[in-house]
Image (cartoon, helix red, strand yellow):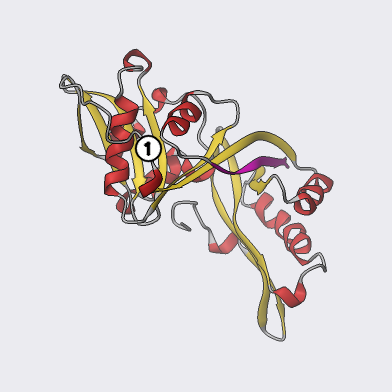
Amino acid sequence: MLIRRGYESRLSFAAFADGEIVAFTLNGVGQFNGIPTAYDTGTGTVKDYRGQGIAGKIFSHSLPFLKEAGIRQYLLEVLQNNNKAISVYRKMGFVTTREFDCFRQNIAEIRNIDSVRPDTAFRIETIDADAVLGAKTFCDFTPSWQNGFESIERGKPGLICLGAIHSDRLVGYGVIDRTTGDLTQIAVDREFRCKGIASLLLREAVSMMETGFIKVLNIPADDSTLHSLLSDRNIPLMNRQYEMILTF
């Protein structure tokens, strides 16, 4: 997870008491929408030290270091029901840029996955991650930080990339982490949609998971295509998040 999210130790910070870490923020670093960005890839505080504003102090302490490193914005995701954290972020100057929906289902509960009738014109096979990186135009939206193309590039050794091939042409793809149950991306060339390709990719992805579940995180709330695909397969909404950004 840390590798995929671009964890940078020299730009991550912690608070200490008696020589022990009591709170920390692990920052990822990379590009987001073409802007040098830091990303909150993990924040935590020991229970006995919560409610003292330590996380906020760590963040304030980190800003000069992030700016000096050329970072121009800070990105995070927060559960929409975490009102306390959202209030703190807004006071810091963060603005909500997108709303995300997150889905999860036990594989045994997924429906209609075996009813897909393969079209002999298409075949599903594993492909190199570079092929996925060359098919960005298949996406209807900019993936979130943890699902983005930089994340795929960083995490290539631990990911499986599936391609839908038509006449030796890549017309759809899916990216999975079979050890975590994560469906990172799934997309189909607009010219080849409504032909069951996404369903074939999803079925193959489910069959390869080593977990007993599949999860699909951070789908923009205004996207209808993936929502429909997941709903038809009985993969329900798990929670909702805000994407928030602070520009320096």
Q: Is 77 placed left or right of 195 in the picture?
A: right
Q: Is residue 135 left or right of residue 50?
A: left
Q: Is residue 153 above or below residue 2?
A: above
- Residue at (32, 44) in percent of width and height: 206
Is 163 or 203 nearer to us in this picture?
203
Which residue appears at 44% of the width and 42% of the height?
150
Magenta stretch secondary structure, dominant: strand
Amino acid type, label 1 = Arg
- Location of residue 161 by image quarter: top left
Q: How many circles with numbers are drawn on the protein?
A: 1
Taking the magenta stretch, the answer to whether it contains residue 76 is: no
Is 183 in front, or is 7? Answer: 183
Instruction: Indicate the position of residue 65 as horizontal and vertical percent values.
Output: 67, 57
- Region of the chain picked out in magenta, as a range: 237-248
- Residue 172 placed where, x, y %? 31, 27
- Tell me if residue 240 is in the magenta stretch: yes
Relative side of 27 to 227, left or right: right
The residue at the point 64 percent across, 47 percent down is: 76
x 76%, y 53%: residue = 85
In the structure shown, which secondary structural element does the residue marked by tag 1 occupy?
loop
Q: Nearer the viewer, residue 88 or 182?
A: 182
Q: Which residue is mark 1?
A: 111
